[in-house]
Image (tube, helix red, strand yellow):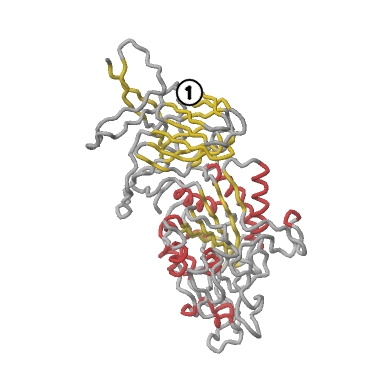
C-alpha cells in the first residue's frame, strides 16, 4: 500500500490537506467509502471524517417519499413531502476557490438541479477539516466552534450567506430550502472572533421629525439603496467582490424621535401633548405632501411594521423594500422639537415587562411584536440634528414650568439632571440580546465633520467632547437680546444649523467598539452609511466589537 497526500487550494492562500490510503498502481475511485474509526485524544471510537475530493460526484433519484444522498461523509437528507415529484439529484465536489472573505475548511460542493426548491427544509451535513466544535470560553474569547456552512442565495452563485449551523465534532449541519453551492468555513480569523457568522440583521432607524430635518431625511433616503445592496451582497466597497458574508435576512423598521411633551395646558409649541409617536414602528409616510408611491396625506400607503429583504432578492423584491423604507423614513417635519431618539428606540424594542416608562410600556411584545428577532444582529441608527433629550422628569418640557425656567431651546443642555442617564439605553438595548455583542449603535448627528474619523477607524470621543464647538452654550449675538438658542456645532448641507449631540456621543462611547458617531453636517451621508455598514459587517462575520 502507499500513503498519498492531497492538497487543495481553498482561497486566501489556505490549503486543505488530507491523507488517503490506496494500493500502488490502483486507481482509487470510490466516493462513498464509510469513515474509519481511530483514536483521537484517547477516544477509541472517534470518527475521522471522509472529506469529498476533487472530481467526486454522486447522483440519485429522490421522490416525494424523501431520501438520503451521500458523498463520502457529506449527506443530504430530504424529508417526506419536501418534493412534489421525483428529482434527479447530484452532488459534486468543485475545485473553485471560496471568495477571499472566507477561509474554506472543505471543498465547495454543488447541488443540482440548480435552483431546486423544497417544500420542507432539507438537512445538510458536511464534513470539514478544521477545529472541531468545543465549548466557547467567553472570558478569554477563544475562537472555537466558529465553523459555519455558507450557501449561495443569488442565482449567479456569487454571494455566500451563513446558515444557522450546528457542529458535532467535524460535521456541520444546517437546513436548506433550495439547491445551490456551499462549503464549510469561517469568515472571521484570529482572536478578535467571538461567534459564528450571523446572517440575520434587524435595523432600527430613529429619525428626527422636527422642522429642520427635511434635507437630512432626503440625504438618508439617498443611501438606502446602498444599505440594502451592501447587506444582501456583502460587497462593502462595491467592487463586485464579497468582503463579508451576505446577510441572509434583513428587517428594517423606522421610528421617529417624537415622544411628545408635557401633558396639559398650555402645551409645548410644535409638540403634541401626550406621547407623540411613542416609539411605534411607522407603517406609512409622515410627510404632509408625500411622494406618489407613498400614497397621499389623507390616504397614505400602509406598508406594515417593517421592510424585509433577503440575499438574492429579485428586482421586484428590492424595489418593494426600497419603496417601503423610503416612505416610512420620510417621517415629516411636524414632530416635537424635544427630540427623544434614545427613549424612542428603547420603547420601540423593549418588551412590556422589562423596562419602566413614564407613559405605558415597551412595544417589543406589543405593537411592534415580530420585528426584533432573538438571534439577529440589532443595529440602531439615530439621525438627528439635535441632541437627545429623553427626560426622566417630563416637567422639563412644560412651557410654564416654575422648576425649569430656561428658554425651551436651552433646557435640554442646561438641566442634565432632569434626563435619564445614557446608561439606561446602553444597558437596556444590550439586555434585549442573549449575546450583547449583537447590538450596534450609531448616530448621524451634529458632530463637526472634521472630528469624525474616516472609514471604520474608532472615534476619539474625548477629543470630540472637548472640542469647543461641542460645548453647549448660548448662541453669541451682537444684539443685547439673547436669541434663546444654543450655539451651533456645525452647518448642515442645506445651510441649517446642527447642535452639539453630547448625549448621543456619550452613548456611542459607552457602546465601545459597537458604537459609532458620524456627522450630519457632511455634504452626503454616503461616508456615514459606509462606515456604519462596515461596523455591522464585522458582527456579521463574527468579530468581537
Q: Residue at x 55, y 81 (%)?
A: 396
Question: For this rendering, which residue is in front, 235 or 128?
Answer: 128
Instruction: Give SS at disc 1.
Output: strand
* Image position of 15 with respect to 502: above or below: above
Single out the residue that lies furthest toward the front: 65
* Image position of 394 with respect to 442: above or below: below
Q: Is residue 140 left or right of residue 316?
A: left
Q: Residue at x 40, y 30 (%)?
A: 73
Callout 1 crowding tier (Cα within 10 Å): few <14, some 14–19, many ≥20: some
Residue 130 percent coordinates (x, y): 34, 36
Q: Is residue 262 left or right of residue 541?
A: right
* Image position of 509 with respect to 401: above or below: above
Q: Does the image show residue 387?
A: no
Is the N terminus in the top left, top right, bottom left or bottom right quadrant? top left
The residue carrying mark 1 is 58
Q: Residue at x 68, y 64 (%)?
A: 332
Q: Does the image show residue 224?
A: yes
Amino acid at each position: 500500500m502507499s500513503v498519498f497526500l492531497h492538497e487543495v487550494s481553498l482561497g486566501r492562500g489556505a490549503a486543505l490537506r488530507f491523507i488517503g490510503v490506496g494500493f500502488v498502481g490502483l486507481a482509487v475511485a470510490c466516493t462513498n467509502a464509510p469513515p474509519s474509526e481511530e483514536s483521537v485524544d484517547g477516544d477509541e471510537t472517534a470518527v475521522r471524517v471522509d472529506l469529498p475530493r476533487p472530481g467526486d460526484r454522486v447522483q440519485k433519484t429522490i421522490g416525494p417519499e424523501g431520501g438520503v444522498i451521500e458523498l463520502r461523509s457529506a449527506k443530504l437528507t430530504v424529508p417526506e413531502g419536501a418534493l412534489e415529484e421525483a428529482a434527479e439529484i447530484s452532488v459534486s465536489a468543485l475545485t473553485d476557490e471560496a471568495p477571499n472573505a472566507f477561509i474554506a475548511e472543505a471543498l465547495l460542493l454543488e447541488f443540482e438541479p440548480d435552483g431546486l426548491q423544497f417544500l420542507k427544509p432539507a438537512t445538510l451535513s458536511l464534513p470539514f477539516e478544521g477545529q472541531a466544535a468545543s465549548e466557547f470560553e467567553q472570558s478569554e474569547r477563544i475562537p472555537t466552534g466558529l465553523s459555519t456552512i455558507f450557501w449561495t442565495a443569488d442565482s449567479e452563485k456569487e454571494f455566500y450567506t451563513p446558515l444557522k449551523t450546528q457542529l458535532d465534532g467535524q460535521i456541520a449541519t444546517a437546513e436548506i430550502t433550495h439547491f445551490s453551492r456551499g462549503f464549510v468555513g469561517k469568515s472571521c480569523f484570529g482572536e478578535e472572533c467571538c461567534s459564528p457568522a450571523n446572517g440575520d440583521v434587524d435595523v432600527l432607524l430613529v429619525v428626527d421629525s422636527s422642522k429642520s430635518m427635511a434635507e437630512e431625511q432626503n440625504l438618508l433616503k439617498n443611501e438606502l439603496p446602498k444599505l440594502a445592496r451592501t447587506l444582501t451582497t456583502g460587497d462593502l466597497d462595491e467592487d463586485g467582490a464579497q468582503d463579508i458574508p451576505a446577510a441572509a435576512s434583513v428587517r428594517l423598521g423606522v421610528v421617529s424621535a417624537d415622544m411628545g411633551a408635557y401633558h396639559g395646558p398650555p402645551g409645548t409649541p410644535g409638540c403634541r401633548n401626550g406621547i407623540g409617536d411613542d416609539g411605534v414602528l411607522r407603517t406609512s409616510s409622515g410627510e404632509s405632501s408625500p411622494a406618489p408611491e407613498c400614497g397621499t396625506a389623507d390616504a397614505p400607503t400602509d406598508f406594515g411594521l417593517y421592510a424585509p429583504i433577503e440575499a438574492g432578492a429579485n428586482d421586484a423584491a428590492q424595489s418593494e423594500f426600497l419603496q417601503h423604507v423610503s416612505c416610512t423614513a420620510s417621517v415629516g417635519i411636524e414632530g416635537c422639537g424635544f427630540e427623544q431618539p434614545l427613549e424612542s428606540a428603547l420603547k420601540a424594542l423593549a418588551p412590556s415587562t422589562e423596562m419602566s416608562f413614564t407613559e405605558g410600556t415597551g412595544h417589543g411584545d406589543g405593537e411592534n411584536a415580530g420585528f426584533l428577532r432573538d438571534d439577529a444582529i440589532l443595529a440602531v441608527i439615530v439621525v438627528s440634528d439635535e441632541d437627545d433629550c429623553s427626560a426622566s422628569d417630563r416637567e422639563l418640557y412644560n412651557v410654564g414650568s416654575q422648576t425649569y425656567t430656561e428658554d425651551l431651546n436651552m433646557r435640554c443642555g442646561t438641566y442634565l439632571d432632569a434626563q435619564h442617564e445614557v446608561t439606561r439605553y446602553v444597558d437596556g438595548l444590550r439586555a434585549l440580546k442573549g449575546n450583547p455583542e449583537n447590538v450596534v449603535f450609531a448616530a448621524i448627528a451634529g458632530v463637526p465633520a472634521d472630528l469624525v474619523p474616516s472609514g471604520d477607524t474608532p472615534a476619539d470621543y474625548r477629543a470630540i467632547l472637548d472640542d469647543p464647538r461641542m460645548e453647549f452654550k448660548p448662541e453669541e449675538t451682537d444684539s443685547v437680546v439673547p436669541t434663546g438658542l444654543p450655539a451651533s456645532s456645525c452647518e448642515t448641507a442645506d445651510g441649517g444649523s446642527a447642535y452639539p449631540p453630547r448625549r448621543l456621543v456619550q452613548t456611542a462611547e459607552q457602546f465601545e467598539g459597537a458604537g459609532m458617531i458620524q456627522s450630519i453636517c457632511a455634504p452626503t451621508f454616503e461616508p456615514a452609511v459606509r462606515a456604519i455598514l462596515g461596523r455591522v459587517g464585522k458582527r456579521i462575520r463574527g468579530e468581537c466589537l
